Image (tube, grey):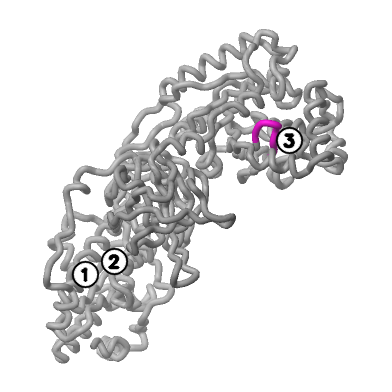
Amino acid sequence: MTEQKTDVIYQTDALIAEDIDAYLETHQHKSMLRFITCGSVDDGKSTLIGRLLYDSKMIFEDQLEALSNDSKKVGTQGQDIDFALLVDGLAAEREQGITIDVAYRFFNTEKRKFIVADCPGHEQYTRNMVTGASSADLAVVMIDARKGVLVQTRRHSYLCHLIGIKNIVLAVNKMDLVDYDQATFDRIVADYAAFAEEIGIESFTAMPISGFRGDNITIAPSENTPWYDGPSLVEHLESVEVLADVAADKPFRMPVQWVNRPNLDFRGFSGLISTGSIKPGDAVRVLPSGKTSTVKSIVTFDGELDEAVAGQSVTITLNDEIDCSRGDVLCVADNPPETADQFEATLVWLNDEDMHVGRGYWLKLGTQTVSATVQQPKYRIDVNTMDELAAKTLSLNDIGVAEVYSDKPLVFEAYETNRTLGGFILIDKITNATVAAGMLNFSLRRSQNVHWQATDITREHHANMKNQTPRVLWFTGLSGSGKSTIANEVEKKLALMNRHTFLLDGDNVRHGLNKDLGFTEADRIENIRRVGEVARLMTDAGLIVLTAFISPFRAERQMVRSMLEDAEFIEIFVDTPLEVAEKRDVKGLYKKARSGELKNFTGIDSPYEPPLKPEITVNTVAMTPEEAADHIIKQILPLK
């Protein structure tokens, strides 16, 4: 250990011993820097973090003793320690040579506190790297001096730039294994600089290091690199600007997380301030409603504040009783963000299953959650060549640009301006798995030119005129299960009861509205989306709508359900075994599918996902169509 670092540790120990309150006060007001280490497999990320933890005295004596069995030698003290063991996870991960998840570690120096994310290097776990980078102020891009710039170096650098990390350190590691050769270092920096310019990285800080030997980690320059006159890694980390400092200079924005109302005399809006600052008396606006008021007080657990800034969690009370709830955004009145429901976005696909064009996903942006669909990508990006390639969908780890449509307006800003109001995730509605991370680039002009036209005759008025409650009776099942036959029987019985109905049949709709669609998975999704929109309009007209569609995917049936009012969607599963449906084969479709003449046929070479909790199930093996219709009528009555 060097004399300088020893003095610092002793000074810290002395302060703790003499005045613990003074030490805690000093520690509390240090700024916090979040950074990641990324790069290719075995570039030394875990070893570097282990070195940082060791040099900052953030490990304990029992850990040192447990780690002392390794044969590697520490350059400064000669102890036998493998630094990677300080941060790596399970033994199985080490056997594979990769870190599967993101390992977060905390350490501090005299000037600053740090949270570092050790991101996995293997391409399979790019999704984990995106998670770690999403909240980082700085990225340490690791390169093995023996290998130079690799594919994952490019991928991770591009993702860091895409996510908006401005501070990038190019750490050329393992310099001790190339005899600290300056020419090797200069060649790698030149190669990386050419790539960085190509993808839009304006600047980066390059430094030669050895995570194992400690060169240029804590103190620079190392005696092994007399040709390097830049800062050490720690010196650089202590001096860079953090996101919170930049965010404080931007206009005030606070996504509302919840409404705090412990009693009738208090109503506050709580959340984390993403950008800007706020004081009592400031004029604010609530979006998307656009209502305005002024700040009455800013409340925290420790009392009221005269001012709150980005990064603080607060409760704000207003001088006027205006509507505001979770998902709304409080902002400065004269400089609000945009609202829109159609965007261009950059997506990083994180799921093993490919993106389904047109399928409904949950889009979560800040505290806002809406249903959204993704259109066919404009292109996907080849991170090696930076070419924009044509793509019909996105697969695991793909990066692409596509249009995203939401069912409700979102309060947003471009990601490069505001990470909180510009960064989002997509969630599968069935599995609740996060399938993509996205960055909003801008709203589409057409979304600003189309406005909802209010009408005087409401959907309630239409329903009352017909003396009925609108419903969508959604029949789903295999081809040949009897959906159309039973739906027709139900409609006849409802007509005898003077109910106003309309039957949308799968084949009939494909003669007109959906004649342009085929039977690929994307076309099937779009087919159901269009039918769902038509059914929704018909319920607005007060009708009872019957639909007879295979609708093979649960996600699309859930999408239609989410379009409608509560309890308006009634899923009816026409449960018929495949062998029974195939024996009926009235249209001869199964025979064609079995022979290979008909592709993408449900039940043969395309899946059918039966409902998990349908409102009604009818078994056509045990029931005749008329019996099934009577059963359904009995279940749905009284309709009013």
In the image, residue 51 lies at what x, y percent?
A: 73, 31
Which portion, as a residue range, is magenta? 107-112
Q: Which residue is mark 3?
A: 53
Residues under labels 2 and 3: Cα distance?
52 Å
Q: Determine whether the residue tagged by mark 1 lies in a helix, strand or loop.
A: helix
Task: Look at 29% across and 76% down and name the residue there.
Answer: 568
Q: Give, as a three-letter code, the residue at label 3.
A: Leu
Are discs 2 and 1 less than 8 Å apart at CB? yes
Q: Which residue is mark 1?
A: 535
Q: Foreground residue, 98 or 78?
A: 78
Q: Determine whether the residue tagged by mark 3 lies in a helix, strand or loop.
A: helix
Q: How would you rate the neighbour count of disc 1 (Cα within 10 Å): few for under 14, some for 14-19, many for 20 or more?
A: many
The C terminus: image quadrant = bottom left
Q: Foreground residue, 476 or 187?
A: 187
In the rendered image, the vertical position of residue 625 relative to residue 94, given as above or below: below
In the image, residue 528 lies at what x, y percent?
A: 27, 63
In the rendered image, the vertical position of residue 302 relative to residue 582, given as above or below: above
Q: Which residue is mark 2?
A: 563
Q: Give, as a three-letter code, the residue at label 2.
A: Met
Q: Give, as a three-letter code, the residue at label 1.
A: Ala
The N terminus: image quadrant = top right
Task: Look at 64% across and 37% down and name the residue there.
Answer: 30
Name the mark nearer the viewer: 2 or 3. 3
